[in-house]
Image (spheres, rainbow, N blue to C red):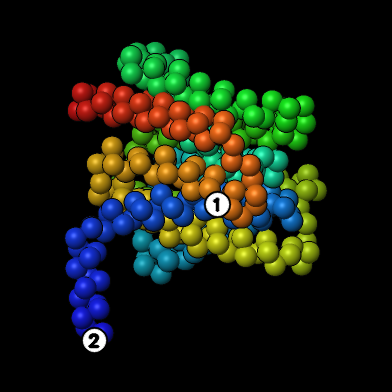
Amino acid sequence: MRTKIKNAFSSKINTIGLPILALCWVSFFWGTTWIASKEGVKHMPALQLAGIRQFIGGFLYISFFMFKKTPWPKGKQWKTIIILSILNFVLSNGLSTWGVKYISSGLGAIIGALVPLWVVIISFFRGERLARLAVIGLVVSFGGVCVIFYDHLSDFLLPDFRFGIFISIISTLTWAFGTLYTKKKAASFNPYFSLGLQMFLSSILLFAFTGATGTSVSLSSIPMISWLSIAYLVIFGSVLTFIAFIYALQNLPAEINSIYAYINPIVAVILGTIIFGESLTTAIAIGGGVTLTGLYMVNYSLRKGRSKIL
């Protein structure tokens, strides 16, 4: 009986394909990390939560590769790793975690999906020509964002809400710069080991900042619910899902792999409504759909441009 079940399960995996399963995993679980972050920052400083998460995640990665006796980065590889740790983890992950302390997890996830727009805009200011489809996608996405924020016009009178929106947008901008820098400095160094080093280095910087500013709290005063949130973020956000993401990235075409970016916000919005009772209004549903449609157009234009270059 066990053999039959095992064979049936293996057959199903082979039929679907491990890369597709990895993409499904990424699409769902990275959406849930917004919920875990929202719950965690209710009870402790956001940057300290991000620092602890990245410290544990980075430590696990580094320990594994030290056990495997993987060569350490050399020379200029360290420069790339340090810059990416600041852009992707200190600023992007740290600020997005801080942002959901003041805004809904669903809204944070939708803002987080705007990275391709920044990539296009930054590329334009660097002298690259924009395809017509990319421009249309930018306009469509901007229209979708306006529809979403129509429901939050009164919230902009609240300083905390404005601050949450501001740092969430900055987090997407730094991730976009990190994305472009990664493409420019594409290294042959092990991407998983690099990821662990980036996490670990970013945690040291975050701890230094929270310690210097006096915004951290003692570990003993952190409630269990926040520790459970951190454990979830480490296991499902920093370790398993990043492994699945890189695996999918290496084994699937870009046009398929990018689907996760459109599913993550949907998962976050739905779970935020179910778990936290966050409002799911018509404006958010329509605006979110329009925004994601515009993002798809931008992504499609970027991929089309790359294929022409190649």
Relative height, residue 88 to residue 173 (above, below): below
Q: Which residue is mark 2?
A: 1
Q: Which residue is mark 1?
A: 271
Residue 222, disc? none
Q: Nearer the viewer, residue 30 or 215?
A: 30
Question: Label 1 vs label 2: CA separation?
Answer: 37 Å
118 left or right, relative to 107: left
Rendered location of residue 90, percent (x, y)? 59, 43
Relative height, residue 273 to residue 132 (above, below): below
Residue at screen point 42% across, 39% down: 262
Residue at screen point 72% across, 53% down: 42
Badge 2 element: loop
Count of residue discs = 2
Rendered location of residue 92, percent (x, y)? 56, 39
Query: What amino acid does circle 2 point to?
Result: Met
Q: Nearer the viewer, residue 12 or 172?
A: 12
Q: Quadrant of residue 193?
A: bottom left
For residue 49, say whether it is visible: no
For label 1, count other residues whose C-alpha is less than 10 Å away and answer few (under 14), some (14-19) or many (20+).
Answer: some
